[in-house]
Amino acid sequence: DAGVTQSPTHLIKTRGQQVTLRCSPKSGHDTVSWYQQALGQGPQFIFQYYEEEERQRGNFPDRFSGHQFPNYSSELNVNALLLGDSALYLCASEGAELEAFFGQGTRLTVV
Amino acid sequence: GIQVEQSPPDLILQEGANSTLRCNFSDSVNNLQWFHQNPWGQLINLFYIPSGTKQNGRLSATTVATERYSLLYISSSQTTDSGVYFCAVDFPDSNYQLIWGAGTKLIIKP
């Protein structure tokens, strides 16, 4: 049983560019959440997708958007990248039991 | 507002020592999870424990929901236990968000 998988694992982008990160949830899970984790900090909630809709959103600007596909996989898009967007981006999936499982993360560096 | 506080913020121990990490939370919970974040950033599930006691090898956890705290016990520490331990809580009013503590950074010295 594959766990939560994220791609790519590492990414370097230039200020102003756009980036798309991808997440495949654990088998049987239908809910995907995205988190941003800056160095030395705890994860910060970006948003959660359920039934292909954004169900809840944290305190992030509209430059951060997402999508969930019918197979429950998800994408996180960030437009107009800023240096401060450099972070580890984590995806978590949940099923009916509400226990969250995390992928290995995508480390984004904006230069 | 709803809060999750972890203590201590940092802990340095010799290999073989035991440790107790604490998580205090401000309200009743839907669920509570303990995670270990390894040096590569991977968040590893340790326990899903909204109440009661669970054990998994050298690790165990207890949540006393009525008193608003959870404890994570690590016995006979190994260097591979090093990393940051997070407590994350789903409150009834948090609208599906996990609310995270600031973490406890644990260093196990050989």
Image (cartoon, coloured by chain):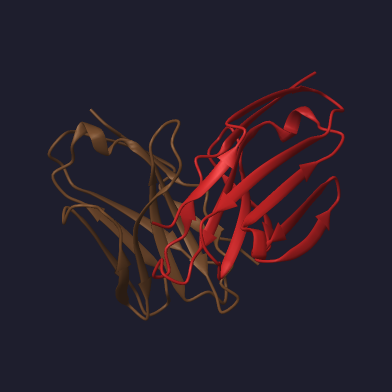
The residue positioned 32% from the left and 68% from the top of the image is A56
Q: Which of A22 and A59 is in front in this view?
A: A59
- Image side of residue B17 versus residue B80, left or right: right
- Left or right for B38, reference A72: right
- In which quadrant will I find the N terminus of chain B? bottom left
- Viewer-closest of A64 and B74: B74
Q: Which of B66 and A64 is in front in this view?
A: B66
Residue at the farthest top position: B110
Rendering coords of residue B109 (x, y %): 75, 19
| Side of B102 where B1 appears, left or right | left
Which residue lies at the image location 45% right of the left edge and 72% below the top edge? A31
The count of marks equals 0
Q: Position of residue B58 (x, y in %)?
A: 85, 45
Q: Nearer the viewer, residue B69 or B44?
A: B69
- Can you tell which quarter of the image residue A74 is in? bottom left
Chain ID for red: B
Position of residue A79 measured from the top left corner of the image (x, y, whole percent): 16, 49
- In the image, residue B22 lies at what x, y percent? 66, 44
Q: Check the picture and name the quadrant holding the C terminus of chain B.
A: top right
In brown, which chain? A
Image: A9 above or below A64:
above
